[in-house]
Image (tube, helix red, strand yellow):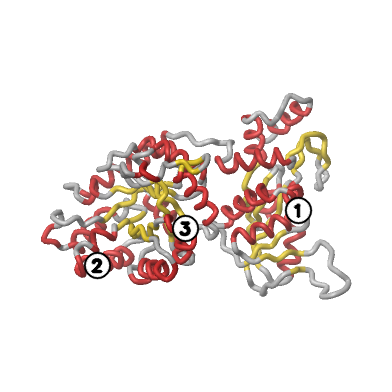
Amino acid sequence: MGFFDKLRAAIERHNSLLCVGLDPRPGYIPNGDILAFNQRTVEQTADLACAYKPNFAFYEAQGLEGLKALKQTVDYIHQTTDVPVILDAKRGDIGSTAEAYARAAFEVWGADAVTVNPYLGHDSLLPFLRYSDRGVFVLCHTSNPGAEDFQTLPVGDYALYEIIAQRATEWNTQGNLGLVVGATYSEELAAVRRIAPEMWLLVPGIGAQGGDLEATLSTGLRADGLGLIISASRSITFAEAPRQAALTLRDQINYLRSQIPTPNSQPSTFNLQLVLALHDLGCIQFGHFTLASGQVSPIYIDLRLLVSDPATLRMVARAYTHMLRHLQFDRIAAIPYAGLPIGTAVALEAGRPLIYPRKEVKGHGTQRAIEGKFEPGERVVVLDDVITTGGSKLTAIEPLEAAGLKVQDVVVLLDREQGGKEELAEQGYQLHSVLTMRELLAALQANGRMGESANDSCIRIFADSHR
């Protein structure tokens, strides 16, 4: 189980986005016993927190005894709770030094995640990112007043922190990278969320630093009501009643979350950009079309055009990769023809092996029904472009299962919501779609891509039939 899987599990169990910081400041610890102080905090908040975040500096500043207490604290959390640990160390260096920092964070201290500094570039983060089961939080826009000294400097058309967010989305190939964005800068937080709509954001600055909790949640939450880790340290650990302080903040977060409307039909910011890019490329066409299923439709989705537009193809690959992060599989099985180039792009983006069942088995050469390397017993996720009915997906699954492969999940870019999901479910398969037809139509209508042609009445009839 990867870090973000552990995090999400803790969030769901404890109904909490609260991360409790464990920062043993000298002079505030009774008898100087750091471990006892931390144990008391953990005991009182273990069912209220989604993560714990010890700041390495406070332990290092107290010498060998402090470092010993850090190791004992991390071990104690792992032994007594189901809550992951984020080591706030802000590491960043080159080559073998970065490798040593990564090994220390994950293998010596046993952290589930660590904060890092991106100033030295992508290669300085690779040693951390290679630990695919651990989380890496990149400093993007910090909560301190001096953040504006450098982080908001213009770089072309963007601020430096926006460039960091953009690069981080490119570096997140294994799905284990998040960003650190301070709650004291709500406009910048909103900008980061627009750039990285699906990434997890670690948000310090609530509590003693005075960050605006309501603004943080309204601008930073994803469409699914998740995506934020709200960190508070002093306001909880040094409170007279730490449990009550944690409970109050946890419940305040949840109340504000409940008051923020979530869209029922509009796609996420990233998916909205994707819909518009597909439309502008010509992949979404209005008219009178007969589909492969034999159904007549006023809208046609032609994703074969993606091979001529690398930028949009990469957006599509990222969208699929996000869906795949939540699934268990050994290989991707792409369905020819439209699904094959998409599957290749997804395999490259996700770093996962690809196979594909042939539509026609050759009468010469190897005469294989399935191309690519695999072993019987492996689990594959089936990938295609669009689903109307489930017929073509079931046809593609047959040779895979005949070869001993296990199939449970099917992933498509668009579910036309015309019975395909239900047909697959009847046969024991689960459909996952990046977009539904309702989301796609709502996005096009809201952004003026429908026009006033005669086709619009047909599109509205189609939309009405899916409400």
| Res 86 quadrant in image | bottom left
* Residue behind mark 3: 121
| Res 465 quadrant in image | top right
Say which label, 3 or 1, has the lower sequence index. Answer: 3
Left or right: 345 as drawn, with respect to 173: right
* Dot 3 and dot 2 residues touching (CB under 8 Å): no
Q: How many marks?
A: 3
| Res 209 quadrant in image | top left
Left or right: 182 as drawn, with respect to 342: left
**Looking at the image, residue 360 lies above or below residue 444:** below
**Looking at the image, residue 311 lies above or below residue 396:** above
The residue located at (78%, 29%) in the rendering is 455
What type is the residue that disc 2 sits on? Leu
The residue located at (66%, 74%) in the rendering is 375
Q: Is residue 83 visible?
A: no
What type is the residue that disc 1 sits on? Ala
| CA–CA distance in space, label 3 to label 1 | 36 Å
Please rate how many residues cluster around mark 2, counting C-alpha atoms within 10 Å: few if below 14, some from 14 to 19, many from 20: some
Residue 67, numbered label: 2
User: Which of 146 and 320 lies nearest the eye of the viewer?
Assistant: 146
The residue located at (70%, 43%) in the rendering is 416
**Looking at the image, residue 300 lies above or below residue 20:** above
Q: Where is residue 447 drawn, in percent x and y? A: 63, 30
* Residue behind mark 1: 338
Identify the element where label 1 is drawn: loop
What type is the residue that disc 3 sits on? Gly
Left or right: 169 as drawn, with respect to 445: left
Identify the element where label 2 is drawn: helix
| CA–CA distance in space, label 3 to label 2 | 28 Å
User: Which of 257 and 336 lies nearest the eye of the viewer?
Assistant: 336
| CA–CA distance in space, label 2 to label 1 | 55 Å
